[in-house]
């Protein structure tokens, strides 16, 4: 049995049934990591010693309980795990050791999951390729010459390469769903506030949400169940009764009304990705879903609004990393201003500096009303428009990304072009709603995905739709590495 090929739900069941031990599982995944990691470069930190100690502890427990019992999990390197590095893939935090566990990490440990390491990302989660990491470039397991997407590229690549069955990323404008589509795995962004952000390094606080990546919808739902709760440490945490997603998966799509947005099917969508999406729509219709096409008047303003708001919030959030309070400290000794300037110059990469400058500009006197305030008003218009859509439809469906993963050495793909890879995903972050990307096929051997996006707190509904689609398609995607 190739244990590393098993899904998280299968691993948990086999351990509880006594057919596998947690130690066997951890050893199998580390053997897999040893074999493929040099090609994929998904991890920044591995904790084999800690993972094996936890596995042996679990094997000694007579009563085996916990939603994640014995399941290996890896986390994006902006989520704090006590005594492990938490770098956000930046030189600014190159040697920072987290002094505490993020609230969601406490939940994983309580549910007896096994944390095996921290994953590569675009620096401070700013990017769509994982090329903006200060330490390494992660590659797509389906084609090592291509990017895995970003900013949670390490999280998606590690799951796709079967280095870990489940991972966590963060999603500010599509940073879990986009790399999941590029890498042929499932990526879920829950309703804003369902998963605590306490212990997660902030990029844009009103947009950021921890997301989950796995090999199927059931696995993703299982991890979501384990880490969704009201956290008093996080003022944005939702104080609601959380429904168990993994225990209520039926996959019955019959009767659901699904909206396809005409604006998303223009010439910017790759023709082969469009064909794949049209096939997916027909499959959903055959399962009993009712499909209608509609327009969004304000959708073209989603990306500009997102980039202004996110840059503004990033410039504020990252101001703490100044070489005095937090982060890398320059050796310059010409006074406090020189230390501030040199520390940030040396510690931050180009993309982060660019966004800080943009954010500072749109918040500056004379520009705030023209840019930032206008972006907030636009966000409200977008949210109201989606609310009207969700009065008549159960979900909005679209391709997750307009194309397949691009070549890592394609110099024509700059940060501006990368921004357009968030066209279909960014809306969910602006309005705080749940969205999930599910593999829907491939184009010339590279995976593509379909996105289901619902109204806020309708996580159970879109998870169920995704599960029904996944089950009917019965797609088998596995990279040849």
Image (tube, rainbow, N blue to C red):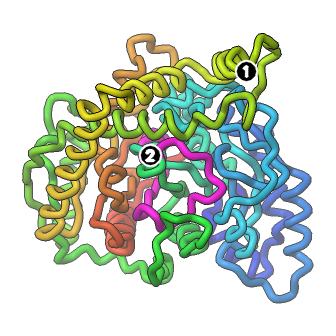
Q: State left or right for residue 42 relative to residue 187.
A: right
Query: Measuring 11% from the left and 69% from the top, which residue is drawn there?
Result: 392
Query: Measuring 78% from the left and 25% from the top, which residue is drawn there?
Result: 329
Quadrant for the N terminus, please: bottom right
- Give the magenta range: 176-204
Q: Main secondary structure of the magenta part?
A: loop
Q: Secondary structure at mark 1?
A: helix
The percent position of residue 181, horizontal first and vertical second, equals: 42, 44
Q: What residue does disc 1 label?
A: 336
CB atoms of marks 2 and 1 within 8 Å: no
The percent position of residue 387, horizontal first and vertical second, equals: 18, 63
Q: Which mark is residue 266?
A: none
Query: Measuring 68% from the left and 71% from the top, which residue is drawn there?
Result: 107
**Is any atom of residue 152 visible in this view?**
yes
Task: Select label 2 or label 1 by which is in front.
Answer: 1
Q: State left or right for residue 10 relative to residue 149.
A: right
The percent position of residue 327, horizontal first and vertical second, equals: 73, 33
- In the displayed structure, 397 sits above or below 250; it is above
In the image, 389 versus 46, the foreground residue is 389
What separation in Å lies between label 2 and label 1 (alpha carbons)?
A: 33 Å
Q: What residue does disc 2 label?
A: 172
**Is any atom of residue 184 visible in this view?**
no
The magenta stretch spans residue 115: no
Q: State left or right for residue 4 relative to residue 312.
A: right
The percent position of residue 205, horizontal first and vertical second, equals: 48, 49
In the image, 334 versus 410, the foreground residue is 334
Q: Quadrant of residue 313?
A: top left
Identify the mark nearer the N-term, 2 or 1. Answer: 2
């Amino acid at each position: 049995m190739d244990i590393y090929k098993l899904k998280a739900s299968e691993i948990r069941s086999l351990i509880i049934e006594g057919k596998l031990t947690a130690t066997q599982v951890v050893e199998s995944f580390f053997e897999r990591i040893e074999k493929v990691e040099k090609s994929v470069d998904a991890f920044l930190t591995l904790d084999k010693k800690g993972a094996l100690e936890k596995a042996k502890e679990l094997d000694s427990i007579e009563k085996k309980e916990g939603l994640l019992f014995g399941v290996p999990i890896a986390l994006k390197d902006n989520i704090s795990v006590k005594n492990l590095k938490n770098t956000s893939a930046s030189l600014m935090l190159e040697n920072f050791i987290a002094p505490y566990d993020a609230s969601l990490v406490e939940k994983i440990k309580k549910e007896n999951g096994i944390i095996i390491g921290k994953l590569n990302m675009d620096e401070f989660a700013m990017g769509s390729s994982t090329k903006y990491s200060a330490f390494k470039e992660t590659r797509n397991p389906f084609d090592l010459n291509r990017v895995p997407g970003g900013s949670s590229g390490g999280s998606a690549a590690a799951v796709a390469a079967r280095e870990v069955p489940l991972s966590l990323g963060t999603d500010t404008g599509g940073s879990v769903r986009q790399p999941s589509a590029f890498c042929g795995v499932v990526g879920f962004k829950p309703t804003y506030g369902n998963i605590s952000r306490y212990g997660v390094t902030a990029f844009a606080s009103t947009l950021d949400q921890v997301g989950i990546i796995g090999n199927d919808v059931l696995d993703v739902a299982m991890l979501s169940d384990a880490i969704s709760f009201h956290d008093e440490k996080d003022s944005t945490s939702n104080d609601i009764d959380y429904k168990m997603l993994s225990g209520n998966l039926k996959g019955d799509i019959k009767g659901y009304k699904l909206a396809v947005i005409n604006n998303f099917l223009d010439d910017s969508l790759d023709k082969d990705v469009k064909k794949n999406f049209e096939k997916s729509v027909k499959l959903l219709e055959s399962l009993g879903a009712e499909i209608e096409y509609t327009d969004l008047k304000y959708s073209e303003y989603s990306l500009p609004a997102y980039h202004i708001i996110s840059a503004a919030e990033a410039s504020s959030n990252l101001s703490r990393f100044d070489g005095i309070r937090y982060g890398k400290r320059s050796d310059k000794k010409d006074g406090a201003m020189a230390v501030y300037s040199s520390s940030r110059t040396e510690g931050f990469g180009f993309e982060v500096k660019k966004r800080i400058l943009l954010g500072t500009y749109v918040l500056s006197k004379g520009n705030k009303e023209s840019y930032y305030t206008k972006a907030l008003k636009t966000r409200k218009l977008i949210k109201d428009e989606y609310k009207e859509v969700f009065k008549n439809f159960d979900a909005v469906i679209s391709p997750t990304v307009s194309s397949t993963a691009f070549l890592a050495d394609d110099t024509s793909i700059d940060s501006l072009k990368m921004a357009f890879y968030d066209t279909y995903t960014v809306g969910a972050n602006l309005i705080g709603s749940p969205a999930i990307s599910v593999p829907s096929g491939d184009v010339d051997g590279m995976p593509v995905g379909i996105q289901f996006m619902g109204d806020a707190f309708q996580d159970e509904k879109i998870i169920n739709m995704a599960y029904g689609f996944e089950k009917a398609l019965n797609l088998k995607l596995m990279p040849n590495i």
